[in-house]
Amino acid sequence: MNEHHQQASRPLGFPVYLLGWALILGAPASLALGGARALALGLLVGGAALVILGLGWSRSYPLKKFTAHTVRYLLLTAGLVIMVFPFYWMISSAFKTPGEINLFPPTIAPKNWLNFDNFYIAFEKAPFARYFLNSIIVMAGSVSVTALTTILAAFAFSRLEFPGREVIFSLLLSMMMVPFEMLVITNYQTIVKVGLNDSLWALVLPFISSIFYTYILRNFFQSIPNGLYWSARVDGCSNWKYLWKVMVPIARPSLVTIILLNALASWNSFMWPLLVIKSDLNRTLPFGLYTFTTEVGANNELLMAASSVVVLPMILLFLFARKQIVRGVARGGIKG
């Protein structure tokens, strides 16, 4: 009896399956046309139930495979929209007029994508050009000094033999477990005592070395064959010359990754500048944006324009170099 019922319901599987997808696709359409959220949720749940019921009745492997791929791509698309939409909304709002920004329901896109009035007004109300220059100076100083200290430390811990090398490196690695907030007090007291507070030097000096970057580059240096090192030494090459003429060019992928990650961290730094910078002319972009929010009040179009100036350079840098970052971290994290 049960087998007869399954055979009778099998022809209904595909129509029920299609009806389920129709209800699922009708949920966002219902919201777009001004329908109630409860109705859209009901369509979504009911459609999913019909899709599952249709799959059970049809017992079609290609249909199940198609459904699995469809659900996977739908979830990936939903995740992409959730992550990308806030950035799109920020950038689009930067080009909207005050009237457009206050519309309800809100408009998805501005009428004029070439309306730069909000950027002009934002730069008039706050010295964002100076903030931008300060961020560039701090980022360049931090990247250059950190790259130098990372190269030297990674070479020492990977090629030079000295007593307690592994113990010292293990102790340094354990410092990665210490939260940044625990080091803020000691770093701040040190900066104040040497008289560097409220200066751009205070934003660079506490971060001129990184055990994380050293760990990545050390692993890459250790993957270089020892025979290459000893061959260079036999030919009269010093450690210093071998480092800069052989190892650094070979480790370029990891070095580029370290530079990019350090640039992102330096550009986005907010908490530390908030503590050590007092004067307006020494603020960086994230700190300047924070103070700008209190000055312009509810002018959201100006806030979005200022936020775009802060965020867009690093977004473009990451999109341009994302493959290099992933490749460098993967190479630096795998020894052999």
Image (spheres, grey):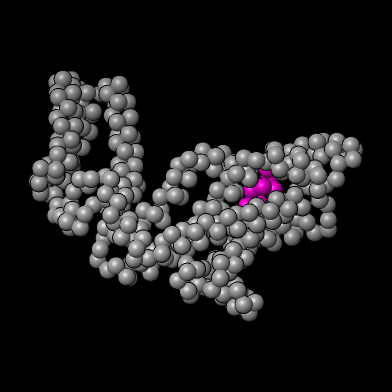
Decide: is 319 above or below 211. above
Q: Is residue 126 left or right of residue 166?
A: left
Q: Nearer the viewer, residue 285 or 227?
A: 285
Quadrant of res 291: bottom left
Decide: is 162 above or below 244. below
Secondary structure mostly taken by the magenta-highlighted segment of the chain: helix
Q: Which residues are magenta?
A: 213-220
Any part of residue 1 in sight:
no
Quadrant of res 11: top left
Asked if the magenta segment contains residue 330, the reply would be no
Asked if the magenta segment contains residue 216, the reply would be yes
Q: Quadrant of the C terminus?
A: top right
Q: Nearer the viewer, residue 138 or 318?
A: 138
Pinpoint residue 124: horizontal percent, then vertical percent: 34, 63
What residue is drawn where x is 65% and y is 77%? 194
Q: How many marks?
A: 0
Pinpoint residue 15: horizontal percent, then vertical percent: 14, 24
Q: Is residue 136 left or right of residue 37?
A: right
Pinpoint residue 154: horizontal percent, then vertical percent: 71, 51
Q: Quadrant of the N terminus?
A: top left
What residue is drawn where x is 83% and y is 56%? 162
Any part of residue 44 in sight:
yes
Q: Nearer the viewer, residue 24 or 294?
A: 294
What residue is drawn where x is 29% and y is 31%? 70
Q: Is residue 231 left or right of residue 181?
A: right
What residue is drawn where x is 75% and y is 59%? 167
Q: Is residue 290 left or right of residue 182?
A: left
Pinpoint residue 255: horizontal percent, then vertical percent: 63, 45
